[in-house]
Image (spheres, rainbow, N blue to C red):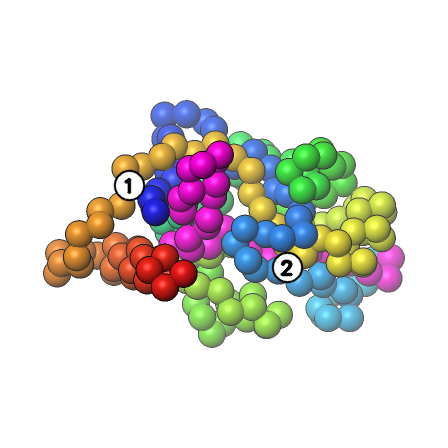
């Protein structure tokens, strides 16, 4: 099965266009709904109505199917970092959708950071164990319908990004050689795991 790296087209201003709240995030990481008592900040209307979670995880294989074509995509640490920066630089922080289908009002990305420390990162405080280089965000929900009918009922469990990326050439299928960087070694391990599961499945 093909494994395709998605990259940002640096000559274009396109990148991530919106953050979607979804029931089954492709990156398989649920967000944490933060209430005022869980966080020592000033209480606002009883609940802070903030969702925190992974927006994009580097080197995580994400299964895709387009008709008969099945393949995996992934994003490098560098692409994740650039995507997080471009999202804010292009003032997209108020763009959100529900299940990638319906535009939503009243959801805003209010915090955004890259995990750089597995011990002291803010995400660790809330029970998340995310790889280094993960883009994490906190989204403020000022939409009563979404909060009551989707967040509180757990109909949505995580974030999924929407955007425009270019395909990079397919990852090489040759054995690992000593010249590969740590990141390339991680990708090669992903390839090996996928091949093994295909052979056993």
Dot label at residue 14: none
The residue under the point 47% across, 28% down is 14
Residue at the disc numbered 1: 170
- Please name which of the two marks, 1 or 2, marks the residue nearer to the observer: 1
Question: Would residue 140 be visible to someone looking at this image?
Answer: yes
For residue 52: magenta? yes
- The answer to whether the residue labelled 1 contacts the one labelled 2, judged by CB atoms less than 8 Å apart, is no
Residue 86, x across and y down, in percent: 48, 37
For residue 36: magenta? no
Residue at the disc numbered 2: 31
From the viewer's perspective, tell me whether residue 42 is left or right of residue 76: right
Check disc 2: other Cα within 10 Å, few if <14, some if 14-19, many if 20+: many
Q: Who comes first in sequence, dot 1 or dot 2?
A: 2
The residue under the point 64% across, 46% down is 109
User: What is the secondary structure assignment of the residue under circle 2?
Assistant: loop
The residues bearing labels 1 and 2 have C-alpha atoms spaced at a distance of 31 Å
Check disc 1: other Cα within 10 Å, few if <14, some if 14-19, many if 20+: few
From the viewer's perspective, tell me whether residue 108 is left or right of residue 7: right
Which quarter of the rendered picture does the C terminus lie within? bottom left
Residue 92, x across and y down, in percent: 59, 35
Residue 113, x across and y down, in percent: 51, 54
Q: Which residues are magenta?
A: 45-73
Q: Farthest residue in the left direction?
A: 178
Q: Nearer the viewer, residue 54 or 92?
A: 54
The residue under the point 49% across, 64% down is 130
The residue under the point 51% across, 69% down is 129
């Amino acid at each position: 099965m093909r494994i395709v790296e998605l990259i940002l087209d640096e000559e274009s201003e396109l990148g991530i266009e919106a953050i979607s709240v979804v029931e089954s995030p492709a990156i398989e990481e649920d967000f944490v709904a933060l209430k005022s008592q869980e966080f020592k900040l000033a209480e606002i209307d009883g609940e802070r109505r903030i969702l925190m979670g992974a927006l994009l995880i580097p080197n995580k294989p994400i299964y895709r199917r387009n008709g008969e074509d099945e393949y995996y995509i992934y994003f490098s640490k560098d692409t994740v970092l650039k995507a997080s920066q471009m999202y804010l630089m292009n003032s997209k922080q108020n763009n959100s959708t529900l299940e990638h289908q319906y535009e939503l009002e009243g959801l805003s990305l209010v915090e955004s950071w890259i995990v750089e420390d597995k011990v002291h990162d803010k995400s660790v405080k809330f029970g998340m164990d995310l790889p280094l280089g993960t883009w994490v965000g906190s989204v403020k929900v000022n939409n009563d319908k979404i909060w009551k009918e989707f967040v509180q009922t757990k109909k949505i469990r995580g974030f999924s990004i929407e955007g425009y990326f270019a395909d990079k050439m397919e990852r090489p299928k040759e054995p690992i050689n000593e010249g590969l960087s740590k990141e390339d070694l991680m990708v090669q391990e992903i390839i090996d795991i996928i091949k093994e599961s295909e052979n056993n499945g």
